[in-house]
Image (cartoon, rainbow, N blue to C red):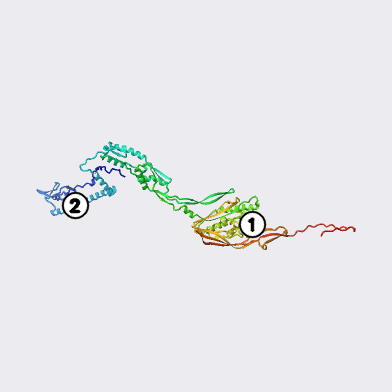
Amino acid sequence: MTTAVPTDAPRPQVYLKSPAFVQAPAARKSFSVQPDRSVDNPFDAANGTLHFSHETSAAKAAPAVRATRSGSSASRSTSSGVKRTSSSGGSKQPPKKRRRRYTVKKKRLLLAGAFLLFAVSVLIGTILLLHYFACGGRERCQQQVDSYETAAPQPGASSPATPDETVISSNVTINGISVQNLTVSEARTRLNDAIARTRASVAITVTYEEHYITLHADDLGLDFSQSLEDALLLAAQSGTSQTLDLTPTFSSESLRNALQPLNEQIPSHAVNATAEISYRTNEIDKTAYYQPYWEFTPGTNGARIDSDALERQIEEAILSGNYTADLTPAVTVSEPDVTVETLEAQYHLLGSYSTNYRFKGSSSTPADVAENCMARDTNISKAVGMMQITKLEPGKSFSFNKKTGERSEKKGWALANAVYQGSGYRKEPGGGVCQISTTIFNAILRAGITNITRRGHSIPSDYVTDHFEEGLGFDATVDDGHIDFGFKNDTGHTIYMFIYITKNKDSGRRKNINVEIYGAEQSGVEYKCRNEILEFTPSDDKDKVEYEIDKTMLASAKPILLRNPHDGYKVMTYVDQYVNGSFSKTVRTEETVYKVIYPKYKIGSAEITPAPTNTPKPTATPAEETPPETEP
């Protein structure tokens, strides 16, 4: 971010000394190599003495050889002025051989020089390459070069005074504060005080739903220093009146770090909705019963704050002078994959059914009947508790007898009336639980389950429906160890069966048995049950009445009913599928036969024997007496 500068303000002159590495290199001077020589050894390789000179003449570049003779000795003068004498009075080697050896040495020296130049070039190149990477590559190096060139002094321009000592002579206002007639140092101090107050007032609140955070100057990395220095430099060099505003910079890294606590409060990932089984408590006659039900918890969206967009929002607020803005950040929202609607379709109520029974008698109820009601209630409550929640995966089966186990007095089952082989009722452990299997049977029929193992009672049950005939064919009996009721989950999806007891609304002496089947919803599909009576045989045929004679019972005594009569039925039941309210097809049929049961009585055959009487002996009647008349 840069300082806002008026368009009509003159641009300040900036000076900078050119860097060394951009200066033109000095011209190289040529040099020559001239070895020391002697008469015995023209090139003194032993001491390796080399002399360098900056002579450019081609004549001086070649070795100069001069020989002088004195008496029997000869002297050879080298370029260094050292004179060597030979005792033999002349050179031991011919001139051609000496020149050849000199040529070889010269070539070696030239090769050594070339290698030295190559090594120096490699060294310089390595240094430049390291400098290139150290300054961040080509662009940054170019920026440095541009800045050096920009800052280079212009010809004829004088160097400015030290910025801190410069007096701002023109009428310049920076951030509403006049800095005229102040040195740059004084203006900086005054403006820094104002900047400190501005920074202390910064309190920008970022809110997302119920989560929020307040950001201060340090959280934003708010910095006025560069803008301040630019403004002071412009004020010191400008000769015109102007008004300048300071524009702070922000730190993206500081902002992201400050937003981290808020991001941690906001769930970064969507949370799916959940479904769990909860319980309600129903109290009936001081007894608590638990009712299971599905409880759905909605999911939550995931969100991440868009830091770049929020930085732009904060920048706009700061530039407009709003240091206490309330901002709602832009966020990236992710929605849950599983919603409450998804779960409700997965745990949809497919079918349900309820029946009711009497659990206690009234003041006028015979004692044996009231006792049977209580025993029956004990068995029903016990069985419901054993199978209150049943989960069945696709293809798995349910068995009533396996759920309850052995039903015996030893296992805590009470003696209550149960239908016994068409001859009426008799007391059995677990009597009354057939009403639970019957209620389950009707619920699964309405859930569309067709793979069922079921047998009807030998006599119709009166608790299936309020209308006796509508319940014909829809009962299901069980007998521990003999007759079982069960079904297989053929829906293709997992199902749940809830069984629970509630108070009957119509009678305080009755309770309801409730069965609910949950599973994957079949949109627009429902199942309905109906029956058809194929045959009816009344039980009031007097010719079919049975009698049992008891010889100890008087024939005149009132007959005793041993077996109640029951009409006979042959019934066909149907389960029909409806789609969007219209009949689609019949998915299940079953025939049930209830045999007619005629009444049976016990009668006596004994006759009444009159008690013996004493007859008086006749007495003689006087002749004169006449016998009395008797009634026939």
Q: Quick one: SS at disc 1?
A: strand
Mark 1 or mark 2, which is nearer the start of the sequence?
A: 2
* Residue 495 position in % (x across, y down): 51, 56
Task: Name the residue tied to disc 2.
Answer: 110
| Residue 476 visible in image | no
Callout 1 amino acid:
Arg
Viewer-proximal residue, 484 or 476?
476
Callout 2 amino acid:
Leu
Viewer-proximal residue, 41 or 214?
214
Is residue 489 left or right of 93 when viewed as pictured? right
Task: Name the residue tied to disc 1.
Answer: 426
Q: Quick one: SS at disc 2?
A: helix
| Residue 438 visible in image | yes
Viewer-proximal residue, 614 or 329?
329
Q: Which mark is residue 490?
A: none
Q: Residue furthest left?
A: 71
Classify the position of the C terminus by image quarter. Answer: bottom right
The residue at 62%/57% (across/down) is 418
In three-dimensional space, the C-alpha distance between marks 2 and 1, rounded to whole angstroms, equals 133 Å
* Residue 616 position in % (x across, y down): 84, 57
Q: Residues within 10 Å of mark 1 (few under 14, many from 20)?
A: few
The residue at 69%/61% (across/down) is 547
* Residue 540 position in % (x across, y down): 65, 61
Is residue 613 left or right of 190 when viewed as pictured? right
The picture quadrant where one finds residue 318 is top left
